[in-house]
Image (spheres, rainbow, N blue to C red):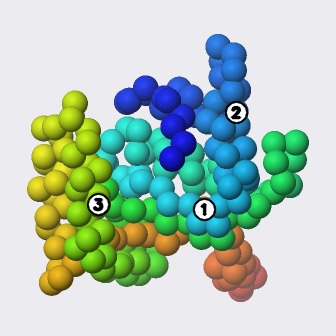
Amino acid sequence: MIRLDYPDFSISPYMGWLLPWGGEGTFAQTLKYLRRIQATRLVIPNRYREHIDHEVVGRIGAFDGPQVGDEVIVDWGRPSPIRSFLEYAVWSDFSPEDALISGANTLMRANRAIKAPNAAEDVVIRALNKFISQKRIITRLLEARSARQYGEGFIELYIDFDPRPALNYEPYKNLISQIERATSVA
């Protein structure tokens, strides 16, 4: 585990490459670290209505992550592409955006799910209970996690996403073609 030591509720001003007051921001640390470990999958926290730091860390991962494999700033390490990006639900539902765009049911916003064994959930619970200073918040989080129980395990939900979706020009070309046909008839 690598700790970047940013203060709680305060990651936002550190986002980017160079900080206004001097020094390097999250981009430099993220790029260097992910290249050093040659990460192949990046899992980011839910960016929708959870916590300001979750939103910011999610944005950092979705922006910096693809650049880990780009041939930019090669003196910070050899490019090593991240092949998959997942966003996980910490305690609230995902944004409806991906479901709306894909035409999926907006009540089931995740597009990936796993069923973890009880033993894995026990490890998570023990880890969360280590945050003694946030006991009341953790208690609510643990209560929310109990809703994940399914049979002899617990479900974990994710969104598999493309951080750099290609722009599909075909609908625009079709629209322009329709406009051109309509105006040439008139």
Quarter of the figure with residue 156: bottom left
Q: Which residue is mark 2?
A: 17
Q: Name which residue lies at 26% across and 42% down.
A: 130
- Judge depth for marks 2 and 3 and give the one in front: 3
Label 3: few (<14), some or many (≥20) within 10 Å?
few
What's the distance in space between the residues labelled 2 and 1, CA to CA? 19 Å
104 or 13: nearer the viewer? 13
- Judge depth for marks 2 and 1 and give the one in front: 2
- Judge depth for marks 1 and 3 and give the one in front: 3
What's the distance in space between the residues labelled 1 and 3, CA to CA? 30 Å
Q: Position of residue 168 (x, y in %)?
A: 67, 75
Q: Is residue 1 above or below residue 172?
A: above
Can residue 176 be seen by looking at this rendering? no
What's the distance in space between the residues labelled 2 and 3, CA to CA? 35 Å
Label 1: few (<14), some or many (≥20) within 10 Å?
some
Q: Position of residue 79 (x, y in %)?
A: 81, 57
Q: Horizontal placement of 90 versus 71: left or right?
A: left
Label 2: few (<14), some or many (≥20) within 10 Å?
some
108 or 57: nearer the viewer? 57
Q: Which residue is mark 3?
A: 123
Q: Which residue is mark 1?
A: 163
Mark 1 or mark 3, earlier in chain: 3
Q: Does the CB distance between marks 2 and 1 fall below 8 Å?
A: no
Quarter of the figure with residue 80: bottom right
**Which corner quadrant holds the C terminus?**
bottom right
Which amino acid, by three-letter code, is at mark 3? Val
41 or 105: nearer the viewer? 41
Q: Name which residue lies at 33% across and 61% down.
A: 89
Say which element carries label 2. loop
Which amino acid, by three-letter code, is at mark 2? Trp
Q: Position of residue 75 (x, y in %)?
A: 88, 42
Which amino acid, by three-letter code, is at mark 1? Pro
